[in-house]
Image (tube, rainbow, N blue to C red):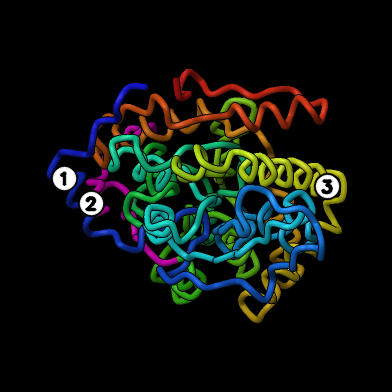
Amino acid sequence: MSAARPLTTLRTIAVIAALPLLLTACGYGSESTDDGKQTPAAAAGAKKLSVDEVKIGYFPNLTHGTALVGVQEGLFQKELGGTTIKASTFNAGPSEIEALNAGSIDIGWIGPSPSINGYTKSNGKNLRIIGGSASGGVKLVVNPKKIKTLDDVKGKKIATPQLGNTQDVAFLNWIADQGWKVDAQSGAGDVSVVRTDNKITPDAYKSGSIDGAWVPEPTASKLVAEGGKVLLDESTLWPDKKFVITNIIVSQKFLKEHPDVVEAVLRGSVKTNAWINANPDEAKVSANKALEKLSGKALPAEVIDPAWKSIQFTDDPLASTLNTEAEHAVKAGLLEKPDLKGIYDLTLLNKVLKAEGKSEVDDAGLGAE
C-alpha cells in the first residue's frame, strides 16, 4: 500500500487546526454521548464473536439513518449475537476520528471530508473505509424573494456548515464552476460564503442575515418549512445523481484483529439498508424515534418527510465520488493533493454482498493492497 502524504501546506494545517468543530453531514457541536439507552442488549446465551463488545459511533441525524435504524430495530445486534453493541453519538467529524484513534470506538459512520482528513493526517495508518451508507440529501435553499435563479446567487450571502466541511467544499466548487471568485478562507468574493452552524442556520435565515444555504438534511427542509425554496439539489451535479455523504469506517487495528465482528456489523448494515429501502415509511418512523431518544424531540412531518425522500441509502461507498470530492478540496485550496490509495478495504463488504445475492462494489482503484 502506498503511504498517504500528510497535509503539509501551512494553509491546510491552519484550516485543520482552526476547525476543531469541523462538521460532516448535519453534525452539530463537538461532544459525543454514550447512547446506551438506545442500544439493545445481546440475547441471553447467544454466541459471542471474537470480542465481548463492539463500540460504534454515528451522528444523530438523517444522513446516518443506517446506524439510527439498525440500532433502533436491533438489526446489528441480531448479527452480532452475544457480542454487545456500545453506541456513541458524535456531533462533529474530528471528535469521531479522535475517538477512533483512541480506541473509544471501533467502527463509525462519518462523512467524506473527515474520512479523507483522518486518513491523510495519519499517513494512511488509522482507518479504512469499509462500506457505504448514504448518498444525497444536500440542497441549496434560498429566499425566493431575493433569489429567483441560479445567476441571482451572485452577490448574495449563502451559508455553509463550516469552513472546509463537505458541503462547504461542494459550494466553493460550484461557485468556481460559475466563473465567480471567492476567497476560500474568508468566504469573501462574488458570493459571500457565511460559515454557520446548522443548529442556527434556520434562525439566521429567518432574521435575514443570510439569503440562503447549501446544507444537508434535515437543515434544508427546515429552511423550506420557513419559506425557503430549493434552488438546486446537489445530486443533480453528479453522475447518476449519486455522491457519498456518509461512509462506514473502521480502525485498522480492529479490522485486523476482529474481522468477524466487522463482517457482522457490515451484514447488519446491508440488511438494514435493504429494510429501509423496502419499507421507507416504517424506516422513517424508526429513524425519527431514534432521533427523539437521542435529542428529546422528533422532527415534524413537514421536515422529515421531504428530507427522508432526498437521501438514498446504499451499500456502495461510491468511491469515485469521494476521490472527486478530494479533488474539489484541492481545487479550492483547502487541501494539498492527497494520496488516497489504500483508504478503502471492501473485501468483507463484498463477501457479505455476494452471500446476500447482491452485486459487489468497486473501490475506484483506492483499495488497500
Q: Residue at x 52, y 61 (%)?
A: 143
Q: Which mark is residue 15?
A: 2
The residue carrying pointer 3 sits among few (fewer than 14), some (14 to 19) or many (20 or more) residues within 10 Å by Cα, namely some
Q: Which mark is residue 11?
A: 1
Q: Nearer the viewer, residue 294 or 310?
A: 294
**Which structural element holds mark 3?**
helix
Q: Nearer the viewer, residue 101 or 146?
A: 101
Q: Disc 3 designates what residue?
A: 275
Q: Earlier in the sequence, mark 3 or mark 2?
A: 2
**Which structural element holds mark 2?**
helix
Mark 2 touches mark 1? (CB < 8 Å): yes
Q: Amino acid at mark 2?
A: Val
The quadrant in which the N terminus is found is top left
The residue carrying pointer 2 sits among few (fewer than 14), some (14 to 19) or many (20 or more) residues within 10 Å by Cα, namely some
Q: Residue at x 46, y 45 (%)?
A: 251
Residue 156 visible in the displayed image:
yes
Q: Earlier in the sequence, mark 1 or mark 3?
A: 1
Q: Which mark is residue 276?
A: none
Callout in the foreground (1, 3): 3
Region in magenta: 175-197
Q: Position of residue 269 (x, y in %)?
A: 70, 45
Q: Nearer the viewer, residue 24 or 346?
A: 346
Q: Amino acid at mark 3?
A: Trp
Q: Is residue 366 magenta?
A: no
The quadrant in which the C terminus is found is top left
When asked about the image quadrant of residue 100, the answer is bottom left
Q: Position of residue 170 (x, y in %)?
A: 43, 42
Q: Position of residue 319 (x, y in %)?
A: 52, 29
On screen, residue 175 versus residue 288, left or right, reads left
Q: Position of residue 183 (x, y in %)?
A: 22, 46
On screen, residue 272 versus residue 248, left or right, reads right
